Image (cartoon, helix red, strand yellow):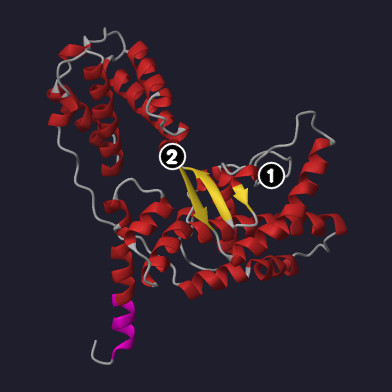
Amino acid sequence: MKQLIDKFVRYLQYERNVSPETVVEYRRDMLQFAEFLTPPGATPPPLETIDHRVIREYVGSMYDRGLERASVARRLASLRTFFKYCMREKHVRQNPARLVATPKLPKRVPHVLTEEELNGFLDNLGASTAAQKSRRKRRPTPKSENAAKIILKRDRAALELLYASGLRVSELVGLNVGDVDRRGQMLRVLGKGRKERVIPYGGKAQAALEAYWPVRDEILARSSSVQSKPPHEAVFLNHLGGRLTDRSVHMIVKKYARLANVDWNLHPHSLRHAFATHLLADGADLRAIQELLGHVSLSTTQRYTQASIKQLMGVYDKAHPHA
């Protein structure tokens, strides 16, 4: 079973061109299923003997462990993909996971910040940082002030670009210098399934990036004196000159939301939601938004229509005298 899982993972990597994060999830899901099939002291059953009843039992065990419906649905989707691969390789005759119903998930309409809220948040990144400094008892040194300015310029460029182009956080941290057309204000992005797309970005993101490029050179110059490896090609760098990570960007967004003293549940994907919803509200075509976001299915993009309608009804209920 584990050998077959390894082959399945290689198939995902080299034939399906699945993103590294998704490969990790598939591998983890399949190893957990293998553990369920082989409790301590038991021998693994032959693959062809695994039917829909076994998979239903596995689904039941996940509920018993308190897993959310979304997690159960994702693991079931992994099993379907795995057995589809096994059918292709003639290891089994049918896909037993297809006979097990996917748990019904609640339709959640994401909360989207208004244009005024988001513009105010981005425009006041520096002000919130200055307010934090004024609350400190110690007087900042010139060196610490310079480091804070460097971080602020990097963070502003990253957040402006997330909102300006609707990037996924993995796409943002994956950007290399060669992917940015500074004159044409375009980005070459490698999205899910390693599919490439080209996205424009606007004037505010351009200004933030132009302020960040000298800072990036400063980070590289400082890091090259303490590291023997060549400078990184990544656009967004940490203080050591390495590529910024997904987790770091999440922490950056949470940090500025905390400094702004707002009660929004803000995360990097919030900026992607806002990008799509604000374009739609201003009359952009849904198909064009689908291309910009890199969605394979238009139904995924249509979720933003629901968010726009909900926001519109909220405005109506507050403003109309007979609402």
The number of callouts visible is 2
Mark in the foreground, 2 or 1: 2
State left or right for residue 122 relative to residue 15. Answer: right
What residue is at 19 percent from the left and 32 percent from the top?
60
Q: Which residue is mark 2?
A: 195
Kindly identify the amino acid type of the residue bearing the numbered disc 2. Lys
Expressed as whole percent of the image width and height from the top left, the position of residue 90 reads 22, 13
Q: Label 2 vs label 1: CA separation? A: 26 Å
The image quadrant of residue 141 is: bottom right
Residue 169 vertical position relative to residue 210 in the rendered view, above or below? above
The image quadrant of residue 74 is: top left
What residue is at 41 percent from the left and 34 percent from the top?
22
Q: Which residue is mark 1?
A: 238
Residue 104 vertical position relative to residue 11 in the rendered view, above or below? below
The image quadrant of residue 175 is: top right
Of the 4 image quadrants, the one containing the C terminus is bottom left
User: Magenta residues, as a range?
Assistant: 313-320
In magenta stretch: residue 161: no
State left or right for residue 157 relative to residue 146. Answer: left
Residue 233 vertical position relative to residue 98 in the rendered view, above or below? below
Kindly identify the amino acid type of the residue bearing the numbered disc 1. Asn
In the depicted view, which residue is nearer to us: 9 or 190?
Answer: 190
Specify which label sits upstream in the sequence, 2 or 1.
2
In the depicted view, which residue is nearer to us: 141 or 285?
Answer: 285
Of the 4 image quadrants, the one containing the N terminus is top left
State left or right for residue 81 relative to residue 19. Answer: left
